[in-house]
Amino acid sequence: MSDIAERSQRIVADWLKRLPREEHERRSFEHRHRVHGNDGALMTNPARLMQAQLGLWQDYMSLWQKHRASHDGMESEPVIDSASTDRRFKDAAWKDNEVFDFIKQSYL
C-alpha cells in the first residue's frame, strides 16, 4: 500500500508539473468550488492529497481486516457504527448481514 501511495503521489506531482500554469489554476479553482467549497487545499497541495488518500486506504484496510476476522468467526468490533438516530441503517440487516455491514461501514 505504501508503494502504491508513493507512486500515486509521484504521478500526481508529475501531472501537476506538466499542466500549464493557467490550466492548473483553472482546475484548482473549479475543483475548490465544485468539491471543497472554498477550501481547495487538497488539490493545490499534492502531498496533502496523497496523505488523505493514504489515510483512506489505511481505513479501508482496517475495515477489511475486521470484516475478514468477523467472517472467519472471530469476535470483531465495528470500525465505525451509525448513530442510533440514523434511520438509514435502522433495518437489522445492516448489522446482521456481513455484506451490508461492510457496505454501511465503508459508507460511514
Image (spheres, rainbow, N blue to C red):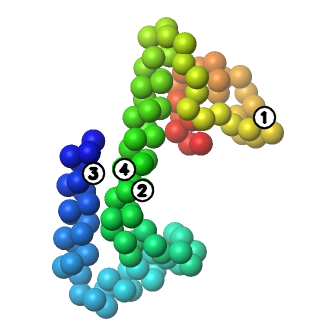
- Can residue 100 be seen in the rendering of this structure? no
Quadrant of the snapshot with the C terminus: top right
Amino acid carrying mark 3 in the image:
Ala
Do the residues under discs 4 and 1 have CB atoms within 8 angstroms?
no
Q: CA distance from mark 3 to mark 1?
A: 35 Å
Q: CA distance from mark 4 to mark 3?
A: 6 Å
In terms of sequence position, does the residue under pointer 1 or pointer 2 come before the other? 2
Q: CA distance from mark 4 to mark 1?
A: 30 Å
Do the residues under discs 4 and 3 have CB atoms within 8 angstroms?
yes
Above-or-below relation of 63 to 49 = above
Amino acid carrying mark 4 in the image:
Leu
In terms of sequence position, does the residue under pointer 4 or pointer 3 come before the other? 3
Instruction: Give the residue at x 20% y 55%.
Output: 7
- The nearer-to-camera label among 1 and 2 is 2
Q: Dot 4 lies on which element?
A: helix
Is the residue marked by circle 3 packed among few (<14), some (14-19), or many (20+) residues within 10 Å? some
Q: CA distance from mark 4 to mark 2?
A: 5 Å
Determine which residue is flagged by label 1. Answer: 84
Q: Position of residue 105 (x, y in %)?
A: 56, 35
Horizontal side of 78 relative to 32 (left or right) equals right
Determine which residue is flagged by label 4. Answer: 54
Q: Nearer the viewer, residue 32 or 103?
A: 32
Determine which residue is flagged by label 3. Answer: 5
Above-or-below relation of 4 to 102 = below
